[in-house]
Image (cartoon, rainbow, N blue to C red):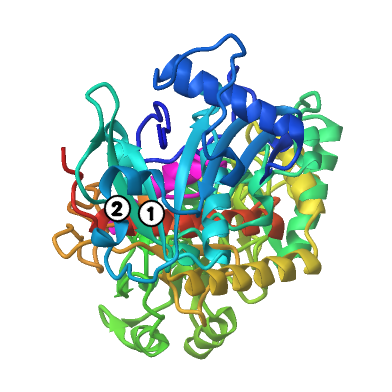
């Protein structure tokens, strides 16, 4: 036997989930990848060989000692994975000729391209303990082998791969050559792979933390987000009546923090999502006796158009291709042009377009609206708490308790630069005046969860200039790293928001695409390419939760990494190697011919 992987499930997806047999990840941080050099490690290797190549795959006769020593043991280099004092996986490499494949095929140089004078090594054995096969053990062992080959200056790696595992071997870059060897009970296909590009292909696994992946999932979505312990503890407090003095004091605290964070004059907190908050904004716009302008450059601008249509607003739409830089000249012209013989009285658009990760120039928009005597309304759901937001001179703005405020979703926020009056022509819950009527005393017109409010207040307590600056710096660093790895980002660097990075994965020319100036459908791309959904699910197997499942992301084959919650640089440093390896794997898998039978 030269090599076996022994029943790896789904060869199209390398094992990544650092779980023990009982489903717990308590052992994840005890895994160590190293070159074997201690006597007890070699004894464990002999026992694992026996279990693999005598008991499971009967290639060698049994013996009373229960150990199997490879005939080239003294010439082998062993890389192992240990869980404390327990061996769970092993791979060994040998570079002394003749190899076992030389004995079976004759001179390998007759088969390998440009092999004259090349440095070649052979993978002798590869085995992973059964209960660790759906873990990251295999990934770590392959990393060790790749590093060894690269640092050793080898040109080729050869091996005998089980015929039943050809898809797996192709997946990690091996190419079949020569006739099948072995016998009917255990047929093997000679295979090789060039070492020249192994550094790039395995760059996603060359990482100091290969033996210590995160034990807790890393949440990098635009919502829900990773919440600090202080927020979780606040949410778990005993509930309060929304008519109690304690609730009123909590509401006043949260409102003070919101106004200080945004420089707004008034803020209504209500049960609902950001969508509900935008409905409240649309209701206020309907009270103005003037047409307006709605600007779109992505999914959430398109949703504002839908809000406007449902509320019966009169407006001019300034639509951009998704991810294209905002054309402020067109916006200015739309504000200047008359609608039904009347000048535009308001401008409504996202401050941060969550779908693309683009951030509008707030100062420029304010100046434009002052020049045209128009009221500015903004969707700030993804920008408040993620970047400095000054709502001074902003007429209305929407927000939400989740996302960058790092609290639980469920509370909508509407900021205003004026004190709205109740309007009985509006539906009660959409009447901003009702929500603001008791703001001085902390009163609310309708039932509101004290648990959600306490969590919001705790999330607001962590806000600081340093936090916002850190998000911007981390986002800039992340974008640079992604570009260096070969990823294409949707937003331009000049307009990129620190907290939202959207990656456009390549698709084939036959893949279906919706026109960029229309709202997307839920139809997924067809044809070959890098499927964002597949990459997202693989990242989840590694413990990283990104955003890819929304219809507008699937339609465009986009994947998002968001820094809206309690995240840190170390998590991103662990994410990048996984992204790099997955990009390489999917690219190579897409380009490779289908495995032969």
Residue lying furthest top: 64
Residue lying furthest left: 510
Q: Left or right: 292 with respect to 69?
A: left
Label 2 – label 1 distance at C-alpha: 6 Å
The residue tagged 2 is 589
Q: Position of residue 161 (x, y in %)?
A: 34, 39
Discs 2, 1 touching: Cβ within 8 Å: yes
Q: Position of residue 45 (x, y in %)?
A: 62, 30
Check if residue 555 falls in the magenta segment.
yes
- Identify the mark at residue 275; answer none if there is no mark: none
Which residues are drawn in magenta? 534-557
Question: Considering depth in this image, is 126 or 219 the residue closer to the camera?
Answer: 126
Quadrant location of the N terminus in the rendered image: top left
Quadrant location of the C terminus in the rendered image: top left
- Residue 118 shows in this picture: yes
Q: Position of residue 295 (x, y in %)?
A: 38, 72
Identify the residue at image location x=50%, y=54%. Answer: 95
Q: Position of residue 566 (x, y in %)?
A: 70, 50
Q: Left or right: 258 with respect to 344?
A: right
> Which quadrant of the view contains residue 511?
bottom left
Check if residue 66 falls in the magenta segment.
no
Identify the residue at image location x=43%, y=20%. Answer: 60
Label 2: which secondary element: helix
Q: Left or right: 443 with respect to 4?
A: right
Question: Considering depth in this image, is 100 or 517 the residue closer to the camera?
Answer: 100
- Residue 306 shows in this picture: no
- Identify the mark at residue 585; answer none if there is no mark: 1
Question: Considering depth in this image, is 43 or 151 the residue closer to the camera?
Answer: 43
Label 1: which secondary element: helix
Identify the residue at image location x=76%, y=28%. Answer: 85
């Amino acid at each position: 036997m030269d090599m076996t992987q022994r029943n790896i499930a789904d060869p199209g997806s390398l094992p990544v989930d650092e779980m023990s047999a009982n489903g717990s990840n308590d052992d994840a941080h005890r895994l160590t990848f190293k070159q074997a050099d201690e006597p007890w490690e070699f004894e464990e290797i002999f026992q694992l060989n026996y279990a693999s190549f005598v008991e499971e795959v009967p290639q060698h006769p049994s013996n009373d000692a229960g150990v199997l020593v490879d005939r080239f043991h003294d010439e082998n280099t062993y890389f192992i994975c240990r869980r404390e004092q327990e061996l769970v996986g092993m791979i060994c490499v040998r570079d002394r000729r003749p190899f076992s494949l030389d004995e079976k095929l004759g001179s390998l140089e007759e088969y390998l391209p440009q092999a004259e004078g090349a440095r070649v090594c052979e993978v002798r054995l590869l085995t992973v303990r059964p209960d660790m096969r759906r873990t990251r053990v295999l990934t770590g062992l392959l990393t060790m082998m790749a590093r060894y080959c690269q640092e050793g200056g080898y040109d080729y790696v050869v091996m005998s791969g089980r015929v039943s595992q050809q898809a797996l071997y192709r997946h990690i870059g091996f190419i079949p050559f020569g006739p099948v060897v072995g016998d009917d009970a255990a047929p093997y296909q000679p295979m090789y792979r060039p070492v020249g590009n192994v550094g790039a292909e395995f760059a996603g696994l060359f990482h100091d933390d290969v033996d210590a992946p995160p034990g807790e999932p890393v949440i990098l979505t635009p919502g829900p987000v990773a919440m600090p312990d202080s927020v979780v503890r606040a949410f778990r407090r005993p509930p309060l009546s929304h008519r109690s003095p304690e609730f009123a004091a909590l509401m006043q605290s949260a409102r003070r923090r919101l106004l200080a964070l945004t420089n707004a004059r008034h803020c209504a907190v209500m049960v609902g999502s950001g969508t509900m908050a935008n409905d409240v904004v649309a209701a206020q716009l309907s009270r103005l006796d003037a047409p307006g302008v709605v600007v779109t450059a992505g999914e959430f601008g398109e949703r504002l158009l839908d809000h406007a249509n449902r509320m019966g607003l009169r407006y001019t739409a300034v639509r951009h291709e998704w991810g294209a830089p905002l054309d402020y000249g067109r916006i200015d012209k739309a504000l200047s042009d008359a609608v039904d013989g009347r000048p535009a009285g308001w401008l409504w658009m996202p401050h941060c377009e969550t779908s693309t990760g683009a951030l509008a120039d707030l100062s420029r928009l304010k100046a434009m609206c002052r020049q045209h005597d128009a009221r500015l309304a903004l969707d700030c759901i993804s920008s408040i708490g993620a970047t400095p937001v000054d709502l001074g001179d902003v007429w209305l703005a929407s927000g939400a308790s989740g996302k960058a405020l790092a609290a639980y979703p469920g509370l909508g926020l509407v900021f205003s630069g004026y004190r709205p009056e109740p309007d009985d022509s509006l539906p009660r819950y959409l009447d901003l005046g009702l929500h603001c009527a008791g703001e001085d005393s902390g009163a609310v017109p309708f039932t509101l969860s004290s648990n959600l409010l306490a969590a919001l207040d705790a999330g607001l307590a962590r806000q600081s200039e340093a936090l916002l600056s850190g998000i911007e710096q981390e986002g800039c660093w992340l974008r640079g790293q992604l570009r260096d790895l070969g990823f294409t980002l949707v937003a331009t660097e000049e307009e990129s928001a620190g907290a939202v990075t959207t990656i456009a994965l390549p698709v084939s020319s036959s893949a279906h695409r919706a026109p960029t100036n229309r709202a997307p459908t839920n139809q997924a791309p067809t044809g070959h390419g890098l499927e964002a959904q597949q990459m997202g699910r693989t990242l989840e197997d590694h413990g990283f939760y990104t955003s890819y499942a929304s219809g507008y992301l699937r339609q465009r084959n986009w994947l998002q990494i968001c820094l809206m919650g309690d995240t840190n640089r170390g998590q991103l440093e662990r994410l990048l190697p996984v992204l790099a390896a997955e990009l390489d794997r999917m690219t190579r898998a897409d380009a490779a011919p289908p495995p032969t039978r």
